[in-house]
């Protein structure tokens, strides 16, 4: 019984970071591509916008990036942040360029 309990606790502890929000101010292009609805072009646009205009003040500021509108924001809002560290989700492989 203790082994089962220990296994469950470990699975929960290890799964936490996998589903952490991605910090749009510090995420690499590859990390941004792990977000649902963000492919290479949108990820590059986010990084370029951030370099040109500085950090995002709120997750909603992401709508200032060309190609990201209300529908994309509705999909992303729960998965992004502007503070803390990025932890890329593992549901989509990242592409290195």
Image (cartoon, rainbow, N blue to C red):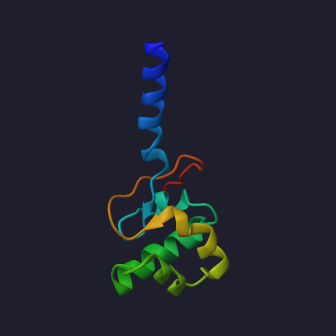
Q: Residue furthest right?
A: 71
Q: Nearer the viewer, residue 66 or 23?
A: 23
Q: Residue at x 46, y 21 (%)?
A: 5
Q: Residue furthest front?
A: 1
Q: Which image quadrant is residue 23 in?
A: bottom left
Q: Residue at x 51, y 51 (%)?
A: 89
Asked whether the viewer can see residue 97, the reply is: no
How far from the left and from the top, in percent, is residue 9?
Answer: 43, 29
Count up the numbered dots.
0
Q: Residue at x 49, y 17 (%)?
A: 4
Q: Nearer the viewer, residue 47 or 71?
A: 71
Q: Which image quadrant is residue 73 in?
A: bottom right
How far from the left and from the top, in percent, is residue 3?
Answer: 45, 14
How far from the left and from the top, in percent, is residue 87?
Answer: 41, 53
Asked whether the viewer can see residue 30, the reply is: yes
Image side of residue 71 versus residue 23, left or right = right
């Amino acid at each position: 019984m203790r082994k089962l309990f220990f296994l469950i606790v470990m699975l929960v502890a290890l799964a936490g970071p996998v589903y952490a929000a991605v910090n749009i101010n510090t995420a690499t292009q590859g990390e941004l591509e792990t977000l649902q609805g963000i492919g290479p072009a949108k990820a590059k646009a986010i990084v370029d916008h951030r370099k040109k205009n500085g950090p995002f003040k709120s997750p909603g500021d992401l709508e200032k990036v060309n190609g990201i509108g209300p529908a994309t924001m509705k999909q992303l809002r729960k998965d992004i942040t502007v503070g803390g560290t990025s932890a890329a989700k593992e549901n989509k492989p990242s592409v290195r360029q």
